[in-house]
Image: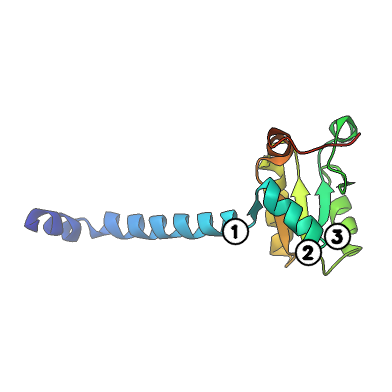
Amino acid sequence: MGYFIQFLLDNWFIVIPLIISIFIFFKLEGIRNSFLLDPQQMVFFLNRKNAVLIDIRNEKDFLKGHISQAVHTGPDIDSCKKEIKKSPEQPIIIVCQNGNYSSRMASDLKKEGQQTFILKGGINSWTSEKLPLIN
């Protein structure tokens, strides 16, 4: 144990940045995961909290099938912001195909103070739960 403590003291210039990096990683991971919704949570938000569901997939994918309450804006953040301005007090849920693009857009919208969530796994997770899509 004494050697370990001596190692930490001798290599403080490595240990301190490592501890700070680990702390920042866990802090950012907690923030990122705080706005992920699984399909059941999303249904709750749509039904009980009157959330606005924005589908940012391309028009072709949207027309193949989408969640019934979804508003299509496409991947353009300005179109998304225009839709959000129509319901400024309501929570916003962003949906894409697999959750990757929507998490980036939600992060940008959160920076502006908008209460924004994403469907974890996107439409893929919705359909894997055997939840309906409409055409």
Of mark 2 and mark 3, the one earlier in the sequence is 2
Tags 2 and 1 touching, CB below 8 Å: no
Q: Quadrant of the C terminus?
A: top right
Label at residue 49:
2
Element marked by disc 3: helix
Q: Gap in Å between the C-alphas at discs 2 and 3?
A: 15 Å
Label at residue 96:
none
Instruction: Name the kind of residue labelled 1 in the image.
Output: Ser
| Residue at 19% in and 57% down | 8
Closer to the camera, 133 or 74? 133
Q: Residues within 10 Å of mark 3 (few under 14, many from 20)?
A: many
Left or right: where 95 falls relative to 26: right
Q: Residues within 10 Å of mark 2 (few under 14, many from 20)?
A: few
Circle nearer the viewer, 3 or 1: 1
Of mark 2 and mark 1, the one earlier in the sequence is 1
Tell me where residue 61 sits by quadrant.
top right
Label at residue 34:
1
Q: Position of residue 26 (x, y in %)?
A: 45, 56
Closer to the camera, 44 or 86? 44
Tell me where residue 123 sits by quadrant.
top right
Q: Position of residue 128 (x, y in %)?
A: 68, 33
Left or right: where 11 falls relative to 23: left
Element marked by disc 1: loop
Closer to the camera, 129 or 70? 129
Circle nearer the viewer, 2 or 1: 2
Tags 3 and 1 touching, CB below 8 Å: no
Instruction: Name the kind of residue labelled 3 in the image.
Output: Ile
Q: Position of residue 1 (x, y in %)?
A: 9, 56
Tags 2 and 3 touching, CB below 8 Å: no
Label at residue 84:
3
